[in-house]
Image (tube, rainbow, N blue to C red):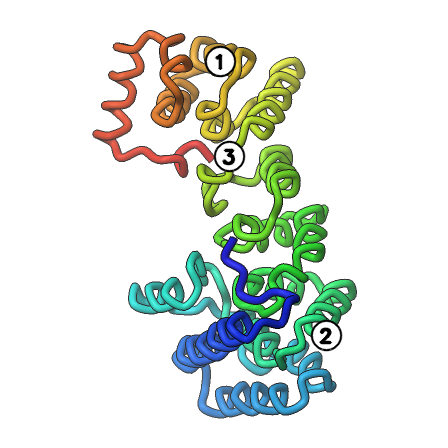
Amino acid sequence: MQALANPSGHDDSNRAATAVCDGFIALADSWIARAISESALLWFRGAVKHIAQAPRGDALATAIGLAPRRLGKGDLTLTPDDRARATALRRGLDPTEWSVDQAARIAFVVASQSGDDAAFAAWFDGFCATAGLNELIALCRGLPVYPAGELLEPRAREAVRSGMKPVFEAVAHRNPYPADYFGEDAWNQMVVKAFFIGSPLWPIQELDRRGNPRLARMLVDLATERWAAERPVSGEVWRCVAPHADEEGIAALLRAFESGGERERLAVALALRRAQDHVTAAFDRPRISDLQARLDAETIDWKAFA
């Protein structure tokens, strides 16, 4: 796990957290500056300064609430260099779908770090408990750059249990936090819920690395229930099943391949690229090879099966 900070209070951990926080505020400032007026930029910078001076004062909540009105809700305009700098600051950091007000709200939260992880985590948990929907989405997208990463895990798990799909996806999609901090049970529950609510799996970072046999069995059970109810099964499921397939998993893959249409067969063929030999041996290998050649020729990836 890539913990940015931990409750032990070690100097190295605190320095790493501070470096990420400072670096993120600088990045956010450069992104936001392109999209807003000079007066709005002055307000943003002033708010960051006031929050840093009084991390637990009223300035933080006030700035979070006013951000859309003062800065607007336009999308960030990011260059390839911006994305590279984000990843260099924090592995997996992906602000691709962030708006200006979301970046500002995250920067405000980051500016409130004072080296007291417990106090930060307590504030974060309390604020999220009463935050409005758009505030909660922004705060969840910022999880990778906050201090006290391990202490925020209960609130992150609560977000993925949310009945609100945008909140779930703020944590689950384009976000390195779950892969770094969720244990196996929490990870599996997140992936299963994505399948259950019809949220695509491909934006989940480290999906292949965090795959495991228990998750594969859970998804096979859900697929079987969907088939029994004559409901469709997303082809993305097989990505998580094939590498860890037991006998029931192999049977489910074969069923999807033989009874499904061309789309289902292509999804299974793509999944089998990461399967063990005893799994691929259950299939007509020349047929699978032909489908995999088509995947290559047409540059078809998992996004096509969402």
Q: Are marks 3 and 1 in contact (CB under 8 Å)?
A: no
Q: Amino acid at mark 2?
A: Ala
In whole angstroms, how far apart are the C-alphas of marks 2 and 3? Answer: 34 Å
Percent position (x, y) of residue 207? 48, 40
Residue 271 image-quadrant placement: top left
Q: Earlier in the sequence, mark 2 or mark 1?
A: 2
Please name the residue that numbered disc 2 is placed on: 119
Q: Nearer the viewer, residue 214 or 190?
A: 214
Q: Earlier in the sequence, mark 2 or mark 3?
A: 2
**Residue drawn 43% across and 20% down?**
264
In whole angstroms, how far apart are the C-alphas of marks 3 and 1? Answer: 16 Å
Q: Are marks 2 and 3 in contact (CB under 8 Å)?
A: no
Residue 250, disc: 1
Q: Amino acid at mark 1?
A: Ile
**Residue drawn 53% across and 31% down?**
212
Q: Amino acid at mark 3?
A: Gly
Q: Earlier in the sequence, mark 3 or mark 1?
A: 3
Please name the residue that numbered disc 3 is placed on: 211
